[in-house]
Image (tube, coloured by chain):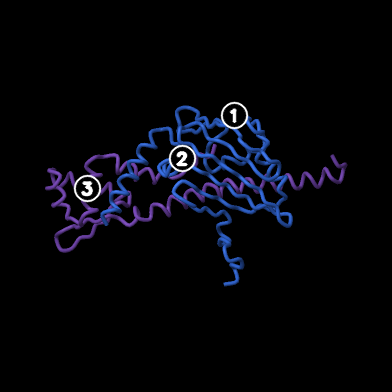
Amino acid sequence: MDARTESDSTPTSSRTSVERKSEREIIVRRTFGGPARLVFEAWTKPELLKRWWVPKSMGMSFLACEADVRAGGKYRFEFLHPSAPTPVAFFGKYLEVVPHSRLVWTNEESNDGAVTTVTFEEKNGKTLLVVHEVYPSKEALDANGGMENGMPETFSQLDELLVDLRSRV
Amino acid sequence: MLKLNYMVQYMNASFDASFAAISDATRRGVLEQLGRADASISALAEKFRMTLTGMKKHVAVLEQAGLVATEKIGRVRTCRLGLRRLEEEAAWIERYREIWDARFDELDRVVEELKRQEKTDGRKNRK
């Protein structure tokens, strides 16, 4: 089919691709129709970041979006959702900030949060964005660290059960 | 900062059914049992020392969540592990992808706007 031209391109209906690279790593890719400096800007200016980080369909709203984007700088996001009793905060610090090409930050709201690396690769006016998250363990990635409302236990419970069941089949 | 599952929780209420289904010790036991071999509802009821009606309810919850599939052959309803659980990892990734996709659609808009802005600014005066 000529709809798929490049060997590893995703179908047009899903411009975002996700790959579980290993038990502890997950990679998200997408190409944006603008130069790296603009895409980078949208990731590093809090007033821009808060416009896209939480898609409208989620029904969540930002209470606070603070980001001191430089190596060692901290960020803190707070969200409110109609069905969540209290706001949820996500925070951490930036480990690396290379303008227009690379961001690395920690996720410290839980003990098993990932280290997230985002790279911006410009080509012919377009930017390939790659989000790479490395978790401390497989369990942490499966549980994704952040489901504070009692979900992590349920998730790991489910995982244990699955491993168990699979080993028997 | 990403914490997608937190958001997934709100986006996919149906997914909660899976968790509700395995929050019960008997139902986990039933899944384990079915992992070893298919079984009829009455055999499960006997195994877990409960009434047929009680076991039917548990199986219905598991079936609702896609964890168990049942099939009636003659007068016996046989239960086996549902396919969905085996596809869980693929589904997990797909949910992950959907969230990023939605998020990046919004980012697309922001980038487009920045591009337009830059053009306008560039025409007026270069910073």
Residue to which mark 3 is pinned? B30
Of B1 and A48, nearer the camera is B1
Question: Which label was assigned to residue A64?
Answer: 1
Q: Are marks 2 and 1 in contact (CB under 8 Å)?
A: no
The chain coloured purple is B
> Residue A64 appears in which quarter of the rendering?
top right
Cα distance in 3D space between marks 2 and 1: 27 Å
Provide the chain ID for the residue under circle 2: A
Q: Is residue A42 left or right of residue B127?
A: left
Alpha carbons under labels 1 and 3: distance apart: 45 Å
- For mark 2, does the 10 Å Cα neighbourhood hold few (<14), some (14 to 19), or many (20 or more) residues? some
Q: Is disc 3 in the same subunit as disc 2? A: no
Q: Secondary structure at mark 3?
A: helix
- Horizontally, is A114 left or right of A120 in the view? left
Q: Secondary structure at mark 2?
A: loop
- The structure residue drawn at horizontal position 15% and vertical position 63%, both measured from the top left corner, is B74
Are the residues under marks 1 and 3 on the same chain?
Answer: no
In the image, residue A40 lies at what x, y percent?
68, 43
State which quadrant residue B78 falls in: bottom left
Q: Is residue A74 above or below residue A156?
A: above
- Indicate the amino acid at tag 2: Pro
- Residue type highlighted by circle 1: Ala
Q: Residue furthest top?
A: A86
Chain letter for blue? Answer: A
- Judge whether A30 appears above or below A11 on screen: above
